[in-house]
Each structure stands twice: as structure tokens, then as C-alpha cells.
């Protein structure tokens, strides 16, 4: 009697389908008990996967924006292989990244990708911070991860993703392992512009412009001895040429802060048009305030104004959009020469 043929591969007996887990999501937080990211080699590999995922996202996003707008201008980027921040900013603005949007919308995949990258960077920073608390010796990987996190958070308009990373990089890591001069200039500019544009801490922003900071490892000991991390902002004179070079800022930083503080909207929007994608994203919170300041000024000074000039005062915002966003009741009309104007207020007859 012939015996039935039995398969020796027991894995085929299971009715459960194998789970295709994302490698970035497979690793958990160190604070939750997952210690795999404490290994330096694993940290390097995990960071490389994050960069690859971001590169894929950028390629898809920039291809959508450049298909109709043409090739983007070249500028400083997260990685030499990535598209320019200007193209990414345009692409990200075109995407509906609101978490309340429907999960079936075309942009749900983009929101999911950004969420995974954000969480993965948080896991990696937590692991690096845990190692730093044990060794007190940061490596170049700390610089790479934190600068990447800052630029990523800026472009995706996530203050929670870049503000804490920016403070940690400047006030903790830099005193222990000095940043390269170009990176230090860039990060200090972001920090000062964020103080003025988003946090509206104008006194602190001007203090950063006029005082010397973060130029020696001794600033860490001074900061911890009295006043917290930001006490190092006002504590240290600079003597070496290299330190002074690192404290120099981009030429537009000072006039941008001054324009935000004093409400010089014409200067602000002129400089904003010349700014790169990262700087423009940092300045985004101040844009609406400057537009509102321009509308108030025009409303007090004009009875009627040329449409083109009004749009320049608003940084390129269309008149109809200004009416919708700010609730302005101005009327569109034509003057005696047939030019488009906006009637701000009509002269009452006597």
C-alpha cells in the first residue's frame, strides 16, 4: 500500500502570510527597551537607510513639481545627490500634508513617508543621545544626523523636528566637537532667523547678532554652571581668527532680522525672493505677519493703489487671495487710463 507523500517544509502549512515590515519601522525606541540602535555600526546603517528613503521621496516630489515648471535652480541641499531645496519647497507646498486629510487621498503616501522618516530620525537621535550620556564624546555621525534632521524639519515645516535639534547641535555638540565653519554659519543663521520669525524673540535675535558665542569647548562648562544651555550665548569672547570666521553670518541675516522686527515689508520680501529654500522655509512664519503689516500700511496711506505695486508689497500674493486670507473688502476697478487698480477707500462727498 502506497503511503501518502508528506511535505517536509512545514512553513507552507501556515495560513498566515509573511509580514513585509518596513526596515525603518522594525527598530523601536531605545527608551522603550529596543537597544539595537545603541550599536554604532547599526546607527550608520540606519542613518543610510533614512537618507535613501528621503532621497526617494525627494525624487518623486521634485519630479511632480518640475514636470510642469521646468528644471529647478541649483542651491545648497541636504546631500549632493538631492534636488534643490527650492524645488522641494515648491513640491511640499503642493502636497496636502494635513494629517486630517482623507487617508484615501493621493497625498496619503507622501504623508506616510514623511511620518516614517520623522519617527526614524527621532529614534536615531535618542540612541545617539543615550550613547553621548555614557561617553561624552560625540562623533561626526552626531553632526551628520543632527544637521540632516534640522534641514529635514525646516523643509517639511516641522518646528518640533528642528528646533530642539538645532539647540542641541549648537549648545551641546558643537562645544564638544566643533562644527565645520560653513555648517556653523548656516546653523547659526537658522537659529537667529527662527528666533525672530517663528518665536518672535526679537531681543534674543539681536543679542545673537551682536555678541560672540559658541567658539570654544569651555562654553559648555560655562553654560552648565549657571543659566542653562543658552547661557553660553552671552558668556564667551572670541580671540582666534578661526572662531571669528565661524561666527560670521550670511549677509542677508542681519537685514532680515531688522526687517522682521521693524516691519519693513518691502525689504523683507526683496530678501525673501533671493533666499534659498531652507532660509525661505525658516522665514515662513513671518511672511503672513509682513503681509498683514503691508495691508495695514496701504489701508492707512492710500485711497487707491496699482494692483502690481500692491502685489509686490504682499510678496507676490494675488489680490483675490489677500481678500480671502485677510478678509479685506477692497474693490477691484480701473482708473481713467484703463489700468487695474484696487480701491482701498472712497472719498465721501461733502
Image: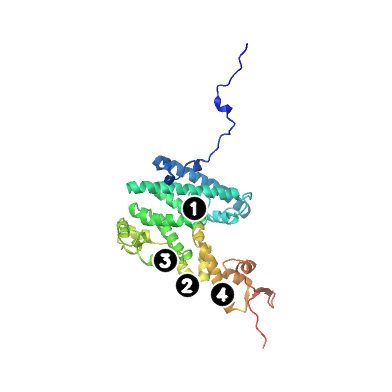
Frontmost residue, 197 versus 216: 197
Q: Is label 1 in contact with label 2 (beta carbons under 8 Å)?
A: no
Q: Is residue 249 left or right of residue 95?
A: left
Say whether disc 1 or disc 4 marks the residue closer to the N-terminus.
1
Which type of secondary structure does the marked residue at label 3 adopt?
helix
Q: CA distance from mark 1 to mark 4?
A: 34 Å
Q: CA distance from mark 2 to mark 3?
A: 13 Å
Q: Where does residue 229 sit, x and y in percent of width and height?
A: 36, 59
Q: Where does residue 333 sit, x and y in percent of width and height?
A: 68, 74
Few, some or many C-alpha atoms within 10 Å of disc 4 (few <14, some 14-19, many ≥20)? few
Say whether disc 3 or disc 4 marks the residue closer to the N-terminus.
3
Residue located beneath label 1 in the image: 152
Which type of secondary structure does the marked residue at label 1 adopt?
helix
Residue 55 visible somewhere in the drawing: yes
Q: Is residue 29 left or right of residue 133?
A: right
Say whether disc 1 or disc 2 marks the residue closer to the N-terminus.
1
Which residue is the extreme one toward the top? 1
Which residue is the extreme one toward the front? 1
Q: CA distance from mark 1 to mark 2?
A: 30 Å
Which type of secondary structure does the marked residue at label 2 adopt?
helix
Q: Where does residue 134 sit, x and y in percent of width and height?
A: 33, 46
Residue 139 visible somewhere in the drawing: no
Q: Residue at x 43, y 68 (%)?
A: 202
Q: Residue at x 46, y 54 (%)?
A: 150
Residue located beneath label 2 in the image: 262
Q: Where does residue 60 sit, x and y in percent of width and height?
A: 58, 48
Residue located beneath label 3 in the image: 205
Amino acid at each position: 500500500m502506497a503511503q501518502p507523500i508528506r511535505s517536509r517544509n512545514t512553513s507552507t502549512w501556515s495560513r498566515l502570510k509573511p509580514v513585509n515590515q518596513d526596515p525603518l519601522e522594525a527598530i523601536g525606541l531605545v527608551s522603550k527597551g529596543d537597544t539595537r540602535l545603541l550599536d554604532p555600526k547599526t546607527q550608520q546603517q540606519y542613518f543610510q537607510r533614512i537618507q535613501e528613503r528621503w532621497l526617494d521621496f525627494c525624487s518623486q516630489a521634485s519630479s511632480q513639481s518640475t514636470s510642469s515648471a521646468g528644471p529647478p535652480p541649483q542651491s545648497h541641499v541636504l546631500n549632493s545627490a538631492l534636488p534643490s531645496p527650492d524645488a522641494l519647497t515648491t513640491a511640499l507646498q503642493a502636497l496636502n500634508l494635513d494629517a486630517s486629510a482623507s487617508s484615501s487621498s493621493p497625498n496619503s503616501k507622501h504623508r506616510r513617508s514623511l511620518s516614517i522618516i520623522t519617527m526614524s530620525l527621532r529614534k536615531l537621535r535618542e540612541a545617539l543621545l543615550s550613547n553621548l550620556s555614557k561617553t561624552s564624546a560625540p562623533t561626526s555621525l552626531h553632526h551628520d544626523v543632527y544637521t540632516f534632521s534640522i534641514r529635514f524639519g525646516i523643509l517639511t515645516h516641522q518646528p518640533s523636528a528642528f528646533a530642539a535639534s538645532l539647540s542641541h547641535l549648537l549648545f551641546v555638540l558643537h562645544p564638544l566637537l566643533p562644527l565645520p565653519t560653513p555648517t556653523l554659519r548656516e546653523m547659526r543663521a537658522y537659529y537667529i532667523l527662527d528666533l525672530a520669525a517663528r518665536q518672535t524673540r526679537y531681543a534674543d535675535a539681536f543679542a545673537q547678532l551682536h555678541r560672540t558665542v559658541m567658539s570654544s569647548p569651555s562654553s559648555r562648562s560655562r553654560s552648565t554652571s549657571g543659566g542653562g544651555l543658552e547661557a553660553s550665548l552671552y558668556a564667551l569672547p572670541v580671540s582666534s581668527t578661526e572662531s571669528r570666521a565661524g561666527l560670521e553670518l550670511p549677509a542677508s541675516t542681519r537685514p532680515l532680522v531688522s526687517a522682521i522686527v521693524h516691519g519693513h515689508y518691502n525689504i523683507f520680501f526683496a530678501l525673501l525672493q533671493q533666499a534659498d529654500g531652507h532660509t525661505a522655509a525658516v522665514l515662513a512664519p513671518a511672511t503672513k505677519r509682513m503681509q498683514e503689516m503691508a495691508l495695514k500700511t496701504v489701508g492707512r496711506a492710500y485711497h487707491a493703489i496699482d494692483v502690481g505695486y500692491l502685489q509686490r508689497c504682499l510678496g507676490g500674493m494675488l489680490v483675490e487671495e489677500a481678500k480671502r486670507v485677510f478678509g479685506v473688502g477692497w474693490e477691484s476697478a480701473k482708473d481713467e487710463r484703463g489700468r487695474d487698480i484696487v480701491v482701498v477707500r472712497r472719498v465721501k462727498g461733502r
